[in-house]
Image (tube, rainbow, N blue to C red):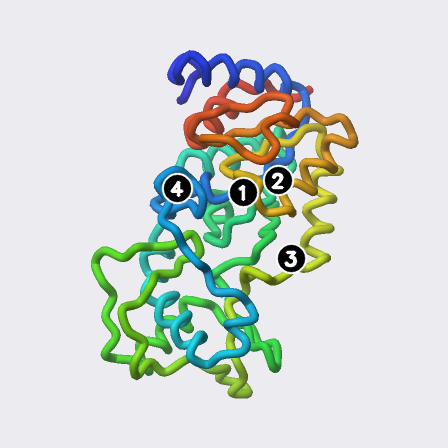
Amino acid sequence: MTTVSALDAAAGEAVAQAIAALAGRRVAVLTGAGVSTDSGIPDYRGKGAPVRTPMTVDQFLASETARRRYWVGSHLGWRAFAAATPNPGHLALADLESRGLATGVITQNVDGLHVRAGSRRVVELHGTMRRVFCTHCGQVFDRRDLSVRVETDNPWISIPENVALGPDGDVLPESTEGFLVPACSVCGGMLKPDVVFFGEFIPAEKFREAEQLVHASEALVIAGSSLVVNSGIRLLERARRRRLPVVIVNRGTTRADARATVKVDAGTSEVLRALADGLPAID
């Protein structure tokens, strides 16, 4: 159990204020990459994060060379990415939902850790690395099955013991020479992971699902997101228009600190656990 007193004085006071603001309200939760750093998956923008230039959707779709580079790097990072396990923050959110205190989780992450932690209502805004689909016929494949096929087609490929894993499960490969890019086993079409690439829009129906979750709630907690991505700001504004309390939990500043009811500048794992332990049951 993480109590308020286990945090430093400033964070402990902020958590106490957050508990007071959220008590008696059903909460929607929006999470970003900072929630998964304690599971070994790095943040794009957190302190100490390496500078990365993720592939855009236009690059992926237009260039066979770019797709080869993507699939090599994505495969090299897949095992480490898939081996990550939910941390106390993920488990705390599943606990809040099971007790009827949270309506669900909206996440910008593609790692699937909220689902594995036991959260039942999870809106994956940016998709999931668990699935791959054919851009031609629409056939969907399990990433685990595709990984086996990639290694069968490329028996020479080796998985480094230590890889510079990215938030999307990608690594920068040393070489892509000779790599056979996987194709759809049904029609031979181009395969694409079921994730929103940079430069690609979040599907409208997925964002509506996130809006509905916020609308069904009486408060909003934003955890581990710097709110650089506009979808997060849009959901925050939906909550503010209804005058709902908004609690932001993040190490360092975000784009919306001034708009929060309470800002907790601390790690998400310990703060989410403290919120789950401190919030009373709703009558």
Residue that numbered label 4 is attached to: 37
Q: Nearer the viewer, mark 2 or mark 4?
A: 4
Q: Residue furthest right?
A: 242
Residue visible at 46% across and 60% down in the picture: 54
Residue at the spot of label 1: 119
Secondary structure of the residue carrying tag 4 is helix
Q: Is residue 95 left or right of residue 242?
A: left
Residue 202 circle label: 3
Q: How many C-alpha atoms fall within 10 Å of the one at disc 2: few (<14), some, or many (≥20)?
A: many
Q: Which residue is mark 2?
A: 104
Q: Of marks 3 and 2, which one's residue comes earlier in the chain?
A: 2
Q: Mark 1 falls on what kind of element?
A: loop
User: How packed is label 3: few (under 14 Cα within 10 Å), some, or many (20 or more)?
Assistant: some
Furthest toward the left, the residue is: 161
**Residue 219 location (% of width, % of height):** 68, 28
Q: Which residue is found at the position 41% from the left and 55% from the top?
A: 52
Residue 250 is marked as: none
Label 3 or label 1, whichever lies nearer to me, is: 3
Regarding mark 3 in the picture, which secondary structure is present there?
loop
Name the kind of residue labelled 2 in the image. Answer: Gly
Of label 4 and label 1, which has the lower sequence position? 4
